[in-house]
Image (cartoon, rainbow, N blue to C red):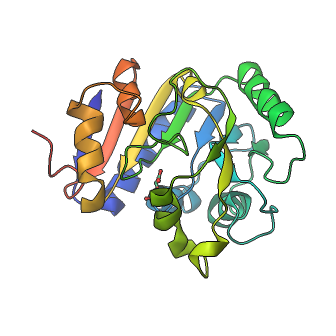
Amino acid sequence: MKVIVTKDKYAGGKATFDIFAEALKQGAKVLGLATGSTPLTFYQEVVTSSLDFSDVISINLDEYVGLAPDNPQSYHYFMQKHLFDAKPFKACYLPDGLTQDPATFCQQYDQLMLDHPIDVQLLGIGQNGHIAFNEPGTPFNLGTHEVQLTESTIKANARFFNEISEVPKTAICMGIKNIMAAKKIVLLAFGTEKAHAVKQLVEGTITEAIPATVLQRHHDVTVICDEAAAAELK
Ligand code: PGA
């Protein structure tokens, strides 16, 4: 696992941009993308760049169950606003939050990633060590699945909603098996509130209780964190 410590989230966004730009130059055609506040400085770099994605496919980590794509709190909307409006892709896939048949949808999403293996997967990390919505205790061998969000994740994400009761209770999410199948993984973490999770990710024991620790088993992971998120690293 390679760790890059940058001064702040803006430098982190630039460092992330450089890795993705190089991967595209080397022929990457499928990008695994993420939402949340963490990837925003990276997306800003992308949007103001000359990179062309018209021959690239994106596959997102997750989506809330019950939110339509045009709901401003949905991850569809987030991706449209922060990336896709400015940078059209050949195709953009996110889980369908309105599916009537989550089990079948999850199988189809797994198949999508078998048909289009992810070249570079972007990740954030939760304060509790979750990756995407794979919360503590999620088996490492799960594929795409519907998850019950934990209280801590609902609280952390409530800042994007008018009130906490509006935060959906479940989501459809790529599993750790899907994430680990990506050829290359880039995980971003900014701010002191992520420092403990970053320490566990890089230096902790591998355990399903801290999902991100599984990344120690992947052969090509780069962690990009700012000085605040790196503060607990030895
Ligand atoms: P954040 O979320 O980028 O909004 O901090 C990251 C995550 O919980 O995975």
Q: Residue furthest left?
A: 234
The x, y position of residue 61, in whole percent, is 62, 42
The x, y position of residue 146, in whole percent, is 69, 41
Residue found at x 73% / y 24%: 116
The answer to whether 45 appears left or right of 66 in the picture is: left
Q: Judge by depth and name the residue closer to the eye, 4 or 140.
A: 140
Residue found at x 48% / y 43%: 123
The answer to whether 138 appears left or right of 231 in the picture is: right
The x, y position of residue 105, in whole percent, is 83, 36
The image quadrant of residue 33 is top right
Q: Which quadrant of the figure contains the C terminus? A: top left
Q: Judge by depth and name the residue closer to the eye, 200 or 225.
A: 200
The total number of labels drawn is 0
The answer to whether 137 appears left or right of 91 in the picture is: left
The x, y position of residue 209, in whole percent, is 38, 34
Q: Judge by depth and name the residue closer to the eye, 121 or 107.
A: 107
In the rendered view, tell whether residue 122 sits above or below residue 76.
above
The image quadrant of residue 78 is bottom right
Residue found at x 54% / y 44%: 132
Q: Residue furthest bottom?
A: 162
Residue found at x 30% / y 26%: 1
